[in-house]
Image (cartoon, rainbow, N blue to C red):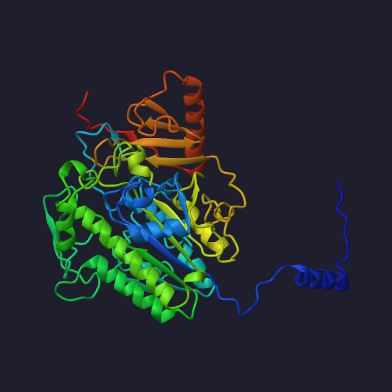
């Protein structure tokens, strides 16, 4: 084979470059950039907002986002517990690819009771990951993180080291000691009988301050101070994670609802309402500062609802389980001028997709070597088309002791969902179009479908380097 040398023609090359600049569409220099406000709620179930069908929880502000934007009916968290999902949002990668597949610091594995040793997992989001916040900051955005971080300890792995100019309340732990100032509480240290006492300045305040309200206040203040600059504000509420502590006046109203008509604990319902109040306060700040029409608002949760707080029916199970109640979450986008209000999409999407979608909406170049597992949803949001991805995967090689939990690999493809129990090899196959509650296991009746999905799931695990579980020689079971 021979190589043909073509001399560089400076004049012609410059003419081509000039023509490209003249012909290519451009955005005027004085056009305001798109702001982004991202609400990431902790442990909020798919059915815990009015827009998804709840008539118990009062969420008028969240419902208004859906009425003015697009609601995804097949929106998923990247994991059944919090830290891996948060890492996926920040990085655009599957938790299995990151080797961050368990909540931090975990500690619920038992050498005598569990048949397999858990897969290895790292204890922080690596600083080598170029987060969505870093990408936006590099493009000239101001960036702020408020609330739950739970992706690594100080001094190295806090939000301020992952692209955020401002960190209000982001720490290594996943819940406050209390929602009432000074947010004090005690927590059991995993695998030990010892307690860790927390009295922490999660956020500055005074006696009587309620944490969800304080986070909303800080977010409001940030928007008003930065309305003249493009900004990325991550409202990552600690609520509605336990401890279940609602504001007394709100709790009292839900306690008046007859028990048979309740969807969840009145204290939890009060917390959901406070989250909704925070959404209202932030959206009012956007309107009053004149930036609402150039701000994308995203609302979602990091996993399904907690079993002792809320019912996820008609979905099966809860947080910590790989059934739909643990994985399917509320997803709402509001993007003025791009999304037709009241839109509903059944496109299959997950936590990794926020990164490339935000970049595309902001007019920034994609970073495919970073958000390797995310898909740009802007064609769906604009009503211009679909996405190419057909399958979404999960790898949870751990025990967490939530109801209906077991180590599992999962694939969702079209209407089919396959669950592989990693400790027994048992397969469960569900047709979610016909059986949203996952009550009818079709693995024996549709073996060809089960085999095909299992092969795809295992090939995916190999492709992302998912760490396997291993035999546990100390296991004392049968």
Which x, y percent locates residue 171? 29, 65
In front of the other: 373 or 360: 360
In front of the other: 158 or 375: 375
From the viewer's perspective, tell me whether residue 354 is left or right of residue 58.
right
Which x, y percent locates residue 437? 35, 33
Residue 148 showing in the rendered view:
no
From the viewer's perspective, tell me whether residue 474 is left or right of residue 345.
left
Q: Is residue 167 above or below residue 460?
A: below
Residue drawn at x 23%, y 75% as measured from the top left? 204
Residue 364 location, quadrant = bottom right
Q: How many marks are shown on the rendered structure?
A: 0
Which x, y percent locates residue 7? 88, 65
Which x, y percent locates residue 31? 60, 76
Q: Is residue 29 above or below residue 279?
A: below
Quadrant where the C terminus sits is top left
Q: Is residue 27 above or below residue 186?
A: below
In front of the other: 443 or 219: 219
Residue 326 showing in the rendered view:
yes
Residue most extreme to the top:
445
Q: Is residue 163 above or below residue 386?
A: below
Residue drawn at x 51%, y 66% as measured from the top left? 135
């Amino acid at each position: 084979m021979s190589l043909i040398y073509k001399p560089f023609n400076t004049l012609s090359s410059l003419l081509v470059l000039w023509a490209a600049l003249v012909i290519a569409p451009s955005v005027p220099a004085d056009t305001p950039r798109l702001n982004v406000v991202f609400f990431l709620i902790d442990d909020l179930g798919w059915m815990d907002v009015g827009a998804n069908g709840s008539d118990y929880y009062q969420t008028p502000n969240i419902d208004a986002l859906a009425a003015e934007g697009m609601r995804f009916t097949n929106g998923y968290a990247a994991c059944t517990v919090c830290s891996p999902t948060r890492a996926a949002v920040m990085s655009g990668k599957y938790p299995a690819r990151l080797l961050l597949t368990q909540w931090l610091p975990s500690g619920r594995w038992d050498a005598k009771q569990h048949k397999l040793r858990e897969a290895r997992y790292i204890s922080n989001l690596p600083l080598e990951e170029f987060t969505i916040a870093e990408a936006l900051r590099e493009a000239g955005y101001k960036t702020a993180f408020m609330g739950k971080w739970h992706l690594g300890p100080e001094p190295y792995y806090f939000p301020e080291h992952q692209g955020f100019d401002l960190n209000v309340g982001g720490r290594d732990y996943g819940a406050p000691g209390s929602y009432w100032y000074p947010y004090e509480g005690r927590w059991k240290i995993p695998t030990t009988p010892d307690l860790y006492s927390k009295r922490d300045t999660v956020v500055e305040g005074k006696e009587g301050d309620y944490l969800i309200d304080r986070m909303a206040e800080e977010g409001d203040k940030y928007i008003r101070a930065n309305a003249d600059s493009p900004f990325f504000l991550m409202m990552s509420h600690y609520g509605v994670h336990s401890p279940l502590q609602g504001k007394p006046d709100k709790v009292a109203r839900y306690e008046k609802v007859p028990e048979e008509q309740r969807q969840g604990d009145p204290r939890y319902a009060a917390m959901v309402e406070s989250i909704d109040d925070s959404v209202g306060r932030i959206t009012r700040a956007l309107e009053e500062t004149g930036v609402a029409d150039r701000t994308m608002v995203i609302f979602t949760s990091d996993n399904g609802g907690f079993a002792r707080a809320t019912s996820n029916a008609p979905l099966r199970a809860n947080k910590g389980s790989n059934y739909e109640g643990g994985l399917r979450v509320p997803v709402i986008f509001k993007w003025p001028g791009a999304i037709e209000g009241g839109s509903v999409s059944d496109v299959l999407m997950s936590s990794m997709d926020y990164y490339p979608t935000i970049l595309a909406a902001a007019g920034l170049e994609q970073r495919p070597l970073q958000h390797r597992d995310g898909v740009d949803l802007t064609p769906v949001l604009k009503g211009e088309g679909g996405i190419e991805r057909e399958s979404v995967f999960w790898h949870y090689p751990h025990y967490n002791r939530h109801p209906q939990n077991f180590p599992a690999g999962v694939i969702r493809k079209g209407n089919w969902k396959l669950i592989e129990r990693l400790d027994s090899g048992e397969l469960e196959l569900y047709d979610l179009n016909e059986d949203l509650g996952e009550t009818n296991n079709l693995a024996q009746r549709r073996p060809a479908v089960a085999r095909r999905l299992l092969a795809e799931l295992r090939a995916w695990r190999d492709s992302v380097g998912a760490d396997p579980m291993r035999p546990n020689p100390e296991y004392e079971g049968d």
